[in-house]
């Protein structure tokens, strides 16, 4: 006796059941009030240290997130300067400490975004040791007013401004050509001396004075692909980066396919949480 007809019948029944399950979820989510959906999504992503701004379609790290208390070592993140992401470290000495203001932009897995992070040491670090020194996140009392605007072909994708230690913004399911994206950053300092030291750090990083806009204690500048700190890549590391780039593109297409019944991010993620909870958990971890 052949089991093929039985197998095909079971497969057909499973497909029918799955279809009705998805249809029920879609109707349920569409009938939920917008405010209720926003509150539910925020509750679901809060354990991952994320906050969602529906008006901007933007994920951010709130000031009290665990990530704000973590530090960084430039040598550990050197590999992030792939074809899909770039990093710009700016060092300067001020008030007996070496400061690091680090800018990042590009593809974070299925997310596209950027960030500005503030870090420092408790002593002056010599230039030759900066790349291998562990920098701590600055205390909340020393946070600065930061502004981050991500652009593509001179068109604004999003803009966010806040008093922060690590200002960030990420949009899910979107891909942009890294070479065509720009991060416009603005930093407001507490005094003229700190501003001047930061300007010196920018000049050391390859900027010219004509690329900087200064108004009072606020300085603005563009982080473009040509300003990415360069590192030597072997053939194997380049192949790995190309594979990551293809994986990111595939994940964006898969996300779009799985959530096609919906248009807004809130509906898409609530649907994935109910239909594919493990996929939802994976998406809530923004990968560098």
Image: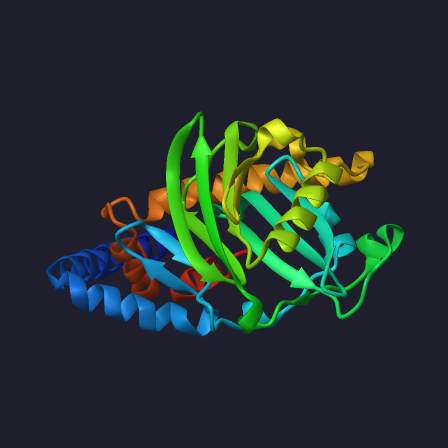
The residue located at (49%, 62%) in the rendering is 164
Please indicate, yes or no, whether residue 211 appears anywhere in the rendered image: yes
- Residue 57 is situated, as x and y percent measured from the top left of the image, at 32, 50
Give the answer, above or below, for where 122 lies relative to 83: below
The residue located at (45%, 39%) in the rendering is 150
Residue situated in front as seen by the camera: 62 or 122: 122
Q: How many marks?
A: 0
Residue 230, quarter of picture: top right
The residue located at (54%, 60%) in the rendering is 166
Residue situated in front as seen by the camera: 106 or 149: 149
- Residue 274 is situated, as x and y percent measured from the top left of the image, at 30, 66
Q: Is residue 257 left or right of residue 112?
A: left
Residue 95, quarter of picture: bottom right
Q: Is residue 249 left or right of residue 76?
A: left
- Residue 255 is situated, as x and y percent measured from the top left of the image, at 39, 47
Q: How is the image coloured?
A: rainbow
Please indicate, yes or no, whether residue 80 appears anywhere in the rendered image: no
Q: Is residue 231 left or right of residue 59?
A: right
Residue 194, quarter of picture: bottom right
- Residue 147 is situated, as x and y percent measured from the top left of the image, at 46, 49
The residue located at (76%, 70%) in the rendering is 122
- Image quadrant in which the N terminus is located: bottom left
Give the answer, above or below, for where 174 lies relative to 44: above
Residue situated in front as seen by the camera: 120 or 157: 120
């Amino acid at each position: 006796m052949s089991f093929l007809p039985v197998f095909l019948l079971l497969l057909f029944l499973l497909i029918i059941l799955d279809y009705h399950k998805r249809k029920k979820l879609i109707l349920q989510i569409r009938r939920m009030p917008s405010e209720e959906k926003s509150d539910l999504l925020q509750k679901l992503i809060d354990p991952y240290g994320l906050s969602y701004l529906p008006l901007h379609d933007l994920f951010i790290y709130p000031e009290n997130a665990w990530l704000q208390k973590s530090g960084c070592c430039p040598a550990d993140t050197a590999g992030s300067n792939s074809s899909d992401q770039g990093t710009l470290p700016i060092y300067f000495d001020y008030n007996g400490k070496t400061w690091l203001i680090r800018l990042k932009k590009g593809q974070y897995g299925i997310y596209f975004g950027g960030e500005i992070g503030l870090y420092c040491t408790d002593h002056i670090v010599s230039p030759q040791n900066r790349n291998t020194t562990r920098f701590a996140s600055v205390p909340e009392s020393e946070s600065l007013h930061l502004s981050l605007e991500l652009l593509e072909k001179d068109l604004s994708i999003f803009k966010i401004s806040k008093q922060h230690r690590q200002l960030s913004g990420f949009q899910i399911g979107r891909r942009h050509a890294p070479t065509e994206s720009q991060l416009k950053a603005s930093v407001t300092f507490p005094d003229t001396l700190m501003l001047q030291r930061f300007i010196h750090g920018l000049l050391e990083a390859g900027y010219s004075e004509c690329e900087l806009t200064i108004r009072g204690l606020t300085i603005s500048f563009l982080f473009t692909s040509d300003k990415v700190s360069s590192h030597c890549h072997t053939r194997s590391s380049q192949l790995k980066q190309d594979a990551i780039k293809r994986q990111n593109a595939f994940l964006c297409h898969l996300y779009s396919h799985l959530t096609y019944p919906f248009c807004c991010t809130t509906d898409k993620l609530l649907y994935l949480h109910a239909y594919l909870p493990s996929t939802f958990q994976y998406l809530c971890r923004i990968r560098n």
